[in-house]
Image: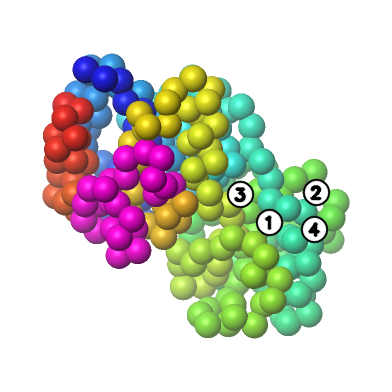
């Protein structure tokens, strides 16, 4: 069988049940087992940070991952590096947030904890996804790197932030924005180049708006049944929902298992 290079988004693609009750469907585990036996290359492609994706990575027994929205690369279980956000653009957004009264926080390392200059962000965001540590006097200018930024606001307040237009962002929770890389195709190409693989041998699976960048015509694109409509419009195959054997059925349809 022709070896294929498969890249899976996590939330809504590998994981069903939503954020608080997430689980990997048994049919997905069976598909992964059979794909591995068939000799295919398996990797995660996620917007999550490397640290926040480790549980899923290990649960599935994967060694390879595109993380941090395409800016992080893990090969053979080893993190090769994470590219940070553009510092000047982050500084500009922080300054505008302070001028307009929006609380903010930064991700300055590969961990489950972000940092904020005071306690406002933790209170106003009402977030339970990440821990928040207060660092008085925190400034983005003095950080070695900023991998993600967070702004506490509710839709449509973000429309008042001009500096936000220069950065990629997404709203996953009502109380705040994620300013984070959203170009998974960059990381996928880097992974394929690392192994000397043909781009045409790649297959990507996704469901969300942050998967749009990896739905490019150079490889095969699979949208979950529960996917965003814009993603379905770019897909080669639309499979069933994540909790209705979507991964397994897509792999069968493609002749991979």
Q: Are marks 1 and 2 in contact (CB under 8 Å)?
A: yes
Q: Residues within 10 Å of mark 1 (few under 14, many from 20)?
A: many
Identify the residue under disc 3. Answer: 113
Q: Are marks 3 and 1 in contact (CB under 8 Å)?
A: no
Q: Nearer the viewer, mark 1 or mark 4?
A: 4
The residue shown at (41%, 40%) is 218
Which stretch appears magenta? 214-238
Q: Earlier in the sequence, mark 1 or mark 2?
A: 1
Q: Residues within 10 Å of mark 4 (few under 14, many from 20)?
A: few
Mark 2 residue element: loop
Q: Which part of the image, by quadrant, shows the C terminus?
A: top left
At which x and y percent is residue 75?
51, 23
Identify the residue under disc 1. Answer: 106
Identify the residue under disc 2. Answer: 143
Mark 3 residue element: strand
Q: Residues within 10 Å of mark 2 (few under 14, many from 20)?
A: few
**Residue 179 located left or right of residue 22:** right
Depth check: 167 or 116 in front? 167
Marks 3 and 1 sit apart, C-alpha to C-alpha, by 9 Å
Q: Are marks 2 and 4 in contact (CB under 8 Å)?
A: no
Q: Earlier in the sequence, mark 3 or mark 1?
A: 1
**Residue 190 located left or right of residue 42:** right
Residue 71 visible (yes or no)? yes
Marks 1 and 2 sit apart, C-alpha to C-alpha, by 10 Å
Q: Nearer the viewer, mark 2 or mark 3?
A: 2
The residue shown at (69%, 76%) is 162
Marks 2 and 3 sit apart, C-alpha to C-alpha, by 15 Å
Identify the residue under disc 4. Answer: 88
């Amino acid at each position: 069988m022709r070896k294929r290079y498969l890249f899976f988004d996590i939330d809504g693609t590998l994981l069903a049940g939503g954020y608080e009750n997430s689980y990997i469907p048994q049919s997905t585990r069976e598909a992964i087992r059979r794909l591995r036996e068939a000799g295919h290359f398996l990797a995660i492609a996620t917007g999550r940070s490397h640290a926040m994706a480790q549980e899923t990575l290990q649960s599935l027994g994967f060694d390879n991952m595109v993380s941090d929205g395409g800016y992080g690369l893990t090969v053979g279980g080893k993190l090769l590096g994470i590219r940070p956000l553009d510092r000047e653009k982050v500084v500009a957004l922080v300054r505008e947030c302070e001028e307009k009264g929006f609380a903010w926080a930064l991700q300055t390392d590969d961990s489950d904890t972000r940092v904020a200059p005071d306690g406002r962000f933790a209170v106003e965001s009402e977030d339970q996804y990440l821990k928040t540590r207060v660092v008085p006097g925190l400034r983005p200018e003095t950080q070695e790197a900023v991998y993600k930024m967070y702004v506490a606001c509710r839709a449509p307040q973000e429309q008042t932030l001009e500096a936000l237009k220069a950065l990629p962002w997404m709203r996953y929770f009502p109380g705040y924005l994620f300013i984070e890389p959203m170009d998974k195709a960059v990381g996928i190409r880097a992974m394929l180049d690392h192994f000397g693989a043909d781009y045409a041998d790649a297959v990507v699976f996704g469901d969300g708006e942050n998967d749009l960048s990896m739905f490019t015509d150079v490889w095969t694109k699979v949208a979950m049944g529960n996917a965003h409509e814009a993603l379905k419009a770019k897909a080669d195959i639309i499979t069933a929902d994540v909790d209705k054997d979507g991964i397994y059925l897509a792999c069968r349809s493609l002749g991979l298992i």
